[in-house]
Amino acid sequence: MQTYRIYLELCEKIMKKIAVLQSNYIPWKGYFDIIASVDEFIIYDDVQYTKNDWRNRNRIKTSSGLQWLTIPVFYQFAYERTQKIRDTRIKSIGWQMSHWEALVNSYKLAPHFNEIAVWLRPLYENMLDENLSHVNLQFIKAICCYIGIKTKLSYSWDYLYKEGRTERLISLCKQTGADEYISGPKAKNYIEESMFDNAGISLRWFDYSNYPVYPQMWGKFTHEVSILDLLFNCGKDASNYMKYKLE
């Protein structure tokens, strides 16, 4: 019995898990929890760019309420069905320091502001890339590094393209050698679960519920903000308020 249990544990350890999500700007903690839960996280950026979405903006808490931080981008309204996230360009300079100043104004009194500013401020000051997806990835990598997430990050265009929403995800699983696919709950609206069963790939829905409340500035608590809010307030203890406890 003991030998069989060890065998099952070894099998679980060698199974590969992946997740596929679109690029987000300074995402909320749930996004990073999904990254931490898999072996490879694929940024799904060769799909249509969506306006007024999380691709180029996120929210922070301020003394006067929630505030959007938005990266200005070129948006071809007439060609909205063909503009991919990976091709979306940033259309003006100056947003970097404007965003940083907003973060300073909101979090300069937070317990871990100076600790986070050491690596976050240079990122804003030196951000010259004009490609939205590249910019988002640089922030995601920096945040992962600070928290301790070591998951492999890749782009969907690193792999061969397959038509069909569910077909494409299954193809990515096969190309990466994944046995299990972790998905956000909103994808239940379009993913055909039976196709994963037929492909012999386990499909698991990530649970965003029951996040613990952490010490947060500026009034009534809210979870739906950038993870930077959690980092400024809790520093290295951030993982204590996330789904996955990281070293």
Image (tube, helix red, strand yellow):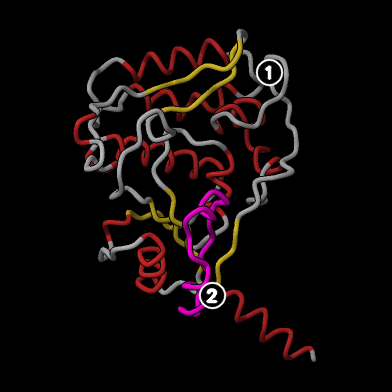
Mark 1 residue element: loop
**Apparent side of residue 31 relative to residue 139 in the rendered image (left or right):** right
Residue sitting at 33 percent across and 17 percent down? 95
Amino acid residing under circle 1: Met
**Neighbours of disc 1 within 10 Å: few (<14), some (14-19), many (20+):** some
Quarter holding residue 224: top right
Residue sitting at 54 percent across and 76 percent down? 14
Above/below status of 169 relative to 147: below
- Lower sequence index among marks 2 and 1: 2
Location of residue 121 in the rendering, given as x and y in whole percent from the top left corner: 42, 23
Mark 2 residue element: loop
Disc 2 marks which residue?
15
**Apparent side of residue 134 relative to residue 13 in the rendered image (left or right):** left
**Apparent side of residue 161 relative to residue 7 in the rendered image (left or right):** left
Amino acid residing under circle 2: Met
Residue at mark 2 to residue at mark 1: CA–CA distance = 41 Å
Magenta region: which residues?
180-201
Q: Residue 217 shows which numbered tag?
A: 1
Residue sitting at 62 percent across and 9 percent down? 63
How many dots with numbers? 2
